[in-house]
Image (tube, rainbow, N blue to C red):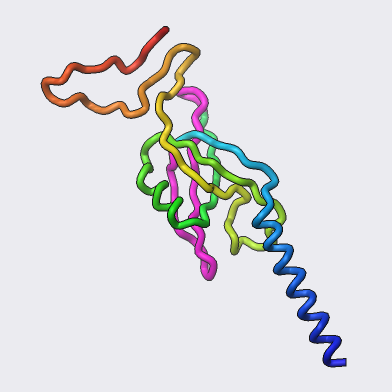
């Protein structure tokens, strides 16, 4: 009787671990979002994950949409911290069916970050991504270009 109880318990734990492994390995969807990282912090009581918000702006003057995301890899988190304040592209995988927030507070897990270049303002009009004041004595570059 005790053997059966232990066997059922071990089987239940093995099934749960297998389910978690499958949920973390399989992605429901993947894609990229572009914007500015406006909030990024390490959170959690026991399971520490990096949680952040990406501000998505489609048109200047429009309402800002927020994209909440989770980062599990410390290397990716360090890359995001380096590029805060710049326009970035975040590559993410959406994981569905994780049973607790111990794996992350959101369904969107960022796996890669790249810095964006030009910012499209309107068809044919772009703003340079790294707009900085020119050095003294250096010729200034135009901020917007048209075809």
- Where on the picture, by quarter, is residue 127? top left
- Which residue lies most toward the left here? 137
State the image coordinates of residue 18 (x, y, percent, origin top left). 72, 66
Residue 21: x and y in percent read: 68, 62
Q: Quadrant of residue 100?
A: bottom right
Residue 113 horizontal/vertical position (percent): 46, 42
Quick check: 22 left or right of 133? Answer: right
Q: Quadrant of the C terminus?
A: top left
Q: Is residue 12 toward the left or the right of residue 87 in the image?
A: right
Query: Which residue lies at the image location 46% right of the left edge and 11% below the top edge?
Result: 124
Q: Is residue 137 above or below residue 24?
A: above
Give the residue drawn at x 35%, y 15%: 144
Count of numbered circles on the image: 0
Horizontal arrangement in the rendering, residue 67 relative to residue 23 (left or right): left
Looking at this rendering, what residue extends furthest in the bottom direction?
2
Q: Nearer the viewer, residue 7 or 42?
A: 7
What residue is shown at x 82% (from left), y 80% (from top)?
A: 8
Q: Which residues are magenta?
A: 36-62
Q: Is residue 27 left or right of residue 11?
A: left
- In this view of the protein, which residue sits in the foreground, 83 or 63? 83
Percent x, y of residue 76:
45, 51
């Amino acid at each position: 009787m005790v053997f059966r109880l232990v066997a059922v318990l071990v089987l239940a734990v093995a099934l749960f671990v297998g389910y978690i492994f499958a949920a973390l390995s399989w992605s429901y969807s993947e894609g990229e979002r572009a914007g500015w990282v406006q909030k990024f912090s390490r959170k959690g009581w026991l399971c520490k994950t990096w949680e952040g918000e990406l501000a998505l702006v489609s048109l200047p003057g429009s309402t800002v949409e927020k994209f909440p995301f989770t980062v599990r890899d410390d290397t990716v988190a360090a890359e995001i911290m380096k590029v805060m304040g710049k326009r970035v592209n975040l590559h993410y995988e959406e994981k569905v069916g994780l049973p607790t927030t111990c794996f992350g507070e959101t369904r969107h897990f960022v796996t890669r970050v790249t810095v964006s270049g030009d910012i499209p303002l309107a068809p044919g009009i772009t703003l340079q991504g790294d707009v900085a004041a020119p050095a003294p004595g250096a010729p200034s570059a135009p901020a917007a270009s048209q075809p």
